[in-house]
Image: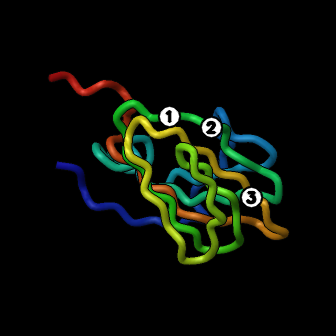
Amino acid sequence: MTPHFTSNIAEIPWQEYPGHFGGALSKALVQPKTCGSRHIDFRISCYQPMAYVAEHVHKVQEQVYHVLEGEGLLTLGDERRVMRRHDYAFMPPGVRHSFTNTGLVPLVFLVITTPVDDEEVPL
């Protein structure tokens, strides 16, 4: 069993993950490397104006984006939607998505992903 874990986001470094551009930074708060989680990847992201994550698809992962500050354009399949404070979106596996800060201030949002790895689940 994984022991409990507490921390402060100031202790976690900002990273620009592959496929993220222009100051699209994230802090990996809960994941196997930070606390030994087995099923959850929980991040806070801060995208500078015009920063974005390129369109991509997850094989088996589900994701939730929850906007805390700023605004951006979420592409989800063939739909495009402006996302602002308190908006959230669910992305099931197999759905193309991207997110771009189209606003004038940083776009800050939470990203919850499960499972941690995006590998096909054996039947």
Q: Nearer the viewer, residue 10 or 23?
A: 23
| Residue 59 figure quarter | top left
Q: Amino acid at mark 1?
A: Val
Give coordinates of residue 102: x percent, y percent: 78, 60
Is 31 rendered above or below residue 90? above
Q: Quadrant of the C terminus?
A: top left
Residue tagged 2: 55
Mark 3, secondary structure of its residue:
loop
Query: Measuring 30% from the left and 24% from the top, which residue is drawn there?
Result: 120
Residue tagged 3: 101
Is 81 rendered above or below residue 77? below
Few, some or many C-alpha atoms within 10 Å of disc 1 (few <14, some 14-19, many ≥20)? some
Few, some or many C-alpha atoms within 10 Å of disc 2 (few <14, some 14-19, many ≥20)? some
For the residues labelled 1 and 3, the Cα–Cα distance comes to 19 Å
Give coordinates of residue 81: x percent, y percent: 62, 61
Give coordinates of residue 4: x percent, y percent: 27, 61
Q: Nearer the viewer, residue 21 or 10?
A: 21
Mark drawn on residue 17: none
**Mark nearer the N terminus (3 vs 2):** 2
Q: Amino acid at mark 2?
A: Glu
Residue 29 as seen in the image, left or right of residue 12: left
Residue tagged 1: 57
Query: Measuring 72% from the left and 47% from the top, which residue is drawn there?
Result: 52
**Mark nearer the N terminus (1 vs 3):** 1
Few, some or many C-alpha atoms within 10 Å of disc 3 (few <14, some 14-19, many ≥20)? many
Residue 76 as seen in the image, left or right of residue 18: left
Is 43 rendered above or below residue 84? above
